[in-house]
Image: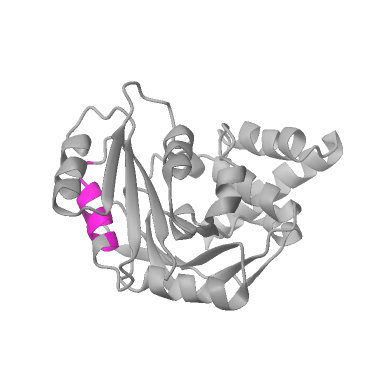
Amino acid sequence: MSLVSIVMPAFNCESTLGEAIESVRRQSFEDWELIVVDDASVDSTLVLAKEFAAKDKRITVLSNAVNSGGAVEPRNKAIALATGDFIALLDADDIWGENKLEKQLAYMQSTQLDLSGTWVEVCDEQGCVIGKRCPPEQVTFSSLLKRNVFACSSVMCVAELLKKNPFPNLGHEDYALWLLLLRDNAQAGILQESLTYYRKRRDSLSANKLKVVPFFWHIYRQQLKFSVFFSVFFTCRYLLLAAVRDLK
């Protein structure tokens, strides 16, 4: 039986943390460990996380003395300590369906994938479903250049791959990492079932298309080493397609 390590960065999320952790504890697949990394929260996030750890030995809580400024450092910190064969990502304001780990693990093992995601139910800040993301199963480097089909909280990856390739310290670090992995021939796919519930916040960085332009430019130009022409092309194309999706 494979062990799945679950990585959860947490910052000032006292209103959603409990629901996120409970969605892990309700999983039909029980051979997991959850590593919560509190990023110097100023609310009761750390206290709540420790309360869960006290009643479930599968939960480990770490805390940063100083806020790191994003999810990169907490995620990489947890990944370094993970002991599972696979690593699943879950943000502290999202939740999973109760069969998520069981079905996704079986999917990855049967298809011998290195990286996978699931379909996603998009929720508002109150948790009400307002949309759905259903990308096709096949994911290639070329298709990923057009659209990031991996909602971060839906991702499961072979642990060795993430340990060797930590999240880069830049905006949209998850998208940057998936591109790098697929460029280097990692095999990826999307499980065609809604097993992840993603909470869409109005003040999220991804909701502001202009502010993320430098991040995409950096990914294409600095991370992937594209030419200036192709970096401009892919940045503009990605933002245009994202805007079209938001209008639907």
Q: Position of residue 86 (x, y in %)?
A: 49, 59
Q: Residue at x 15, y 47 (%)?
A: 54
The residue closer to the viewer here, 155 or 192, is: 155
Magenta stretch? 14-24
- Quadrant assignment for the N terminus: bottom left
**Res. 48 visible in picture:** yes
Q: Which residue is more in the foreground, 217 or 5?
A: 5
In the visual, does 4 lie left or right of 160?
A: left
Quarter where residue 41 is shown: top left
Q: Is residue 16 visible?
A: no
Identify the image quadrant of residue 44. top left
Q: Position of residue 241 (x, y in %)?
A: 65, 55
Q: Residue furthest top?
A: 66
Q: Residue at x 71, y 61 (%)?
A: 143
Figure coloring:
one colour
Q: Main secondary structure of the magenta part?
A: helix
Q: Position of residue 203 (x, y in %)?
A: 39, 39
Residue 16 is one of the magenta-drawn residues: yes
Q: Nearer the viewer, residue 123 or 22?
A: 22
- Find residue 38 and report its image quarter: top left
Total tally of numbered discs in the picture: 0
The residue located at (18%, 41%) in the rendering is 50
Q: Position of residue 227 (x, y in %)?
A: 85, 37
Q: Position of 105 compared to 229: left or right?
A: left
Left or right of residue 236, residue 151 in this image: left
